[in-house]
Amino acid sequence: MPTNSFIATALAVARAGATPVLVDCEPTTQLVDVEAVGRRIGRSTRALLPVHLFGQVAPMEALRTLAQDAGLVLLEDGAQAQGATRQGIGVGAFGLGAGTSFYPGKNLGAYGDGGAVLTNADEVAARVRALRNYGSDVKYDHPELGFNSRLDSLQAVVLSAKLARLAEWNARRREAAARYDALLARLPAVVAPATLAGNDHVFHLYVVRVPRRDAVLAALHAAGIGAGVHYPVPIHLQGAFRHLGHRPGDFPAAEAAARENLSLPIWPGITAAQQEDVVRELTRALG
């Protein structure tokens, strides 16, 4: 799995009793480096877990080939890519299944926290349904350990209403991203996000790279611009995974991205005027 992700990806691996084997990202798209994945596959490897980062799908055909050749399970972290496709194939259909998040800030967000597993495998769907319900698919019969992870009805109602609008909202996000691309073309200091060929990006985040990122971020905040950073500390440098033995410099592409990434405001309803304000303040912050 890639080191440039939210820590929840690695925590899920650890919770399953496995050990995260971290790899670097590709510097341009920041998606997982397939060649690095190939180099890290060993005799104890059991699964590949790419992350569909910032709203676009990882290079899944190459990863699927690696998984098939090594006899591995292919899973997906689709928490940031609801509605995204690669070569016309949607998240959750490339491997055994995908986890996604309904955190309120996601493209498909609930009123509170929630999540789901996407899969085309009937046996996986049945197992997940049981695990979310105390390990039971028959009331008071619990053949295995499970959790209380059922999605409550209020969240389901909100998500059902939003799901009908997801495609339209994602299209608006793509339009907003295209406006940013045009506005930022005049700023040579800013590196706009790259979309991997064959991807239909849904721009959960619009992440640029800038010099002096922390100073630029502070200036934007002072101007009332709600920019952010995803993610300032890669997983391999988090204290929770110190036992993996990694040090600064082990994954240079991810570490460079952590220093330079800046997430500009984007949502389906953002206006052209608001985006012009963002870029105007960004220009001032860059000096």
Image (cartoon, grey):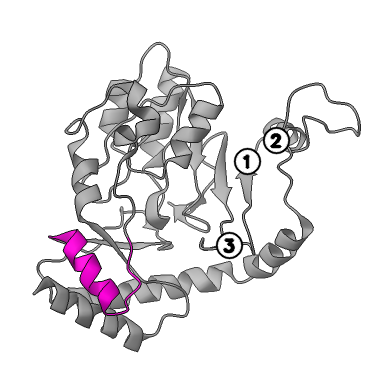
Q: How many discs appear? A: 3
- Residue bearing the label numbered 3: 109
Element under disc 1? loop
- Residue bearing the label numbered 1: 119
Element under disc 2? helix
Q: Position of residue 151 (x, y in %)?
A: 72, 51
Real-space CA distance between mark 2 and mark 1, rounded to the nearest whole angstrom = 10 Å
Mark yes or no: residue 191 visible. Answer: no
Q: How crowded is mark 1: few (under 14 residues within 10 Å), some or many (20 or more)?
A: many
Say if mark 2 contacts mark 1, CB within 8 Å.
yes
Residue 128 is marked as 2
Q: Which amino acid does label 2 sit on?
A: Val
Task: Name which quarter of the figure residue 165 lies in.
Answer: bottom right
Quarter of the image where the N terminus is located: top left
Q: What stretch is highlighted in magenta?
A: 211-228
Identify the residue shown where x is 73% and y is 30%.
146
